[in-house]
Amino acid sequence: MKLKLYEVQATEYNGEQEYFQSKLLAAKNISHARKIARDYFSKWYDDGDKPSEHHTKNPDEFKFICGCNRIKIKSVQRIILDDWIRMQITLNNITDMPDELMTTRIASSSAELLEACKVLTSYTMDLLRRLDNQINNADVEEIQHAQAAIAKHTKVIKNKS
């Protein structure tokens, strides 16, 4: 089963201040995501107690140091990585960011990188074949290393296609 990306938003209360938390996790579905989040936050602060002692009557709230610190899960929702990155930049910046700095293009850039690797590998293999007609490639250590690397990574590239 393919995992999906989820964001967990929580608030930490320490008696004086509140802190916002945003965590990413990969899960099968929303129920699985909530379970992962609850497991994570039940062990979030090591006060020497067992994680089971951190639970309250609310399954999305945890107490630490006899209740002096609490953390409460506010939401668990499906998210796209680019959206989460954009929200984190917006949340953590102190000036307006130009749109060109906010563009992440992570999903398309990995596909573009894979395609560029395929083209470069093909081009390099062709050059090495042509060079082999002029000299004995087996005599040149660097060429042997290049051929071994290409052979190794060509299998990876083919499997990812």
Image: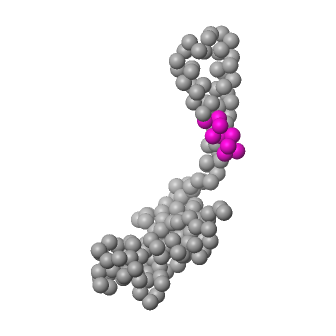
**Along the line of sight, the residue nearer the viewer: 80 or 36:** 36
Magenta region, residue range: 153-161
Find out whether residue 160 is within the magenta segment. Answer: yes
User: Residue 133: where, in percent of width, then height?
Assistant: 68, 12
User: Residue 78: where, in percent of width, then height?
Assistant: 60, 71
Quadrant location of the C terminus?
top right
**Along the line of sight, the residue nearer the viewer: 15 or 2:** 2
From the viewer's perspective, tell me whether residue 86 is left or right of residue 116: left
Which residue is found at the position 52% from the left and 62% from the top?
Answer: 85
User: Residue 112: where, in percent of width, then height?
Assistant: 65, 45
Residue 70 is drawn in which quadrant? bottom left
From the viewer's perspective, tell me whether residue 47 is left or right of residue 28: left
* Residue 20, above or below 108: below
Quadrant location of the N terminus?
bottom right
Q: Is residue 48 visible?
A: yes
Which residue is found at the position 69% from the left and 23% from the top?
Answer: 126
Which residue is found at the position 65% from the left and 14% from the top?
Answer: 132
